[in-house]
Image: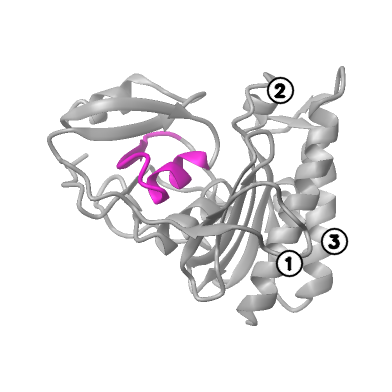
Amino acid sequence: MNYDKLVTVMRRLALEAGDRIMAIYDADDFDVKVKSDASPVTEADEAADALISEGLRAAFPDVTLITEEQAASHDLQATTFLIVDPLDGTKEFINRRGDFTVNIAYVENGVPTRGVVYAPAKNRMFFTQADGTSVEEAAPFDKDGIGDASQIRVSDPDNNALMVVASKSHRDQATDDYIGKYAVKDMKSAGSSLKFCLIATGEADLYPRVGRTMEWDTAAGHAVLHGAGGKVVRFDDHAPLTYGKDGYANPFFIAYSPKVELKPA
């Protein structure tokens, strides 16, 4: 894989998709449908999916492509592939809360190694560079070239005063019970894959997810966190979270700065 080309294409497509999404977000009204799994999908999801899919297939025709909106038509046999969630945080989008992202990632041998997470309503852009390290780019964003980008790194946490981030839309008692095992200084709520990025920048130390997620929800954020020195492991046995699983479903997981002293499930 030509990583320079990959990063350039993923970043540009994320920005273009963000423009499409915001045009619909800022409209007076937009269509919302319900998928077979009872999750919502909007015209923004579909428009962004079409744009990103076309761009990735044109640039990387020989690489398997998985997207949330087309997953039902895929029978994944690959361990190396591109994976896309064109609008992660659809509930945040529908409720106009702004915590939604465009996620594009490249998975190699089951591990997300390159990715971009773009939050267009928040003007935040995180991505891995060609060498695999992660940066946050400051707005305004130019589709033709990277602007002011700063390398990001996970925190050096105080295990007696941890900063924890949890889901804004999927918080439950099981999550609270697990968080209760730690000495927590403060809590943050965030939607979509922004939770991974808050750990990648050192704004949070720990993100436990005791609930359903799919690979396209997590791959880009996982790549960004990995490139900033962070880890993502299974909740049950703390083994690394891998990709290319049958059905694309993730087990429960924990994303964290490596110096956090993880508690058992």
- At x 77%, y 66%, the residue is 56
> Residue 60, image x and y in percent?
75, 75
Q: Which mark is residue 9?
A: 1
> Residue 257, image x and y in percent?
29, 51
Give the magenta range: 194-211
- At x 81%, y 43%, the residue is 19
**Residue picked out by circle 2:** 94
- At x 79%, y 28%, the residue is 25
Q: Quadrant of residue 94?
A: top right
Three-letter code for the amino acid on which mark 2 is drawn: Ile
Contact check, label 2 and label 3, Cβ < 8 Å: no
**Residue picked out by circle 3:** 54
Determine whether 99 is above or below 218 in the image: above
Image-based side of 18 in relation to 252, left or right: right
Task: Characterize the local packing of mark 3: few (<14), some (14-19) or many (20 or more) Cα atoms within 10 angstroms.
Answer: few
Instruction: Reply yes or no: does residue 145 show up in magenta.
Output: no
- At x 33%, y 26%, the residue is 187
Three-letter code for the amino acid on which mark 1 is drawn: Val
Determine whether 7 is above or below 52 in the image: below
3D distance between C-alphas at marks 2 and 3: 25 Å
> Residue 112, image x and y in percent?
50, 64
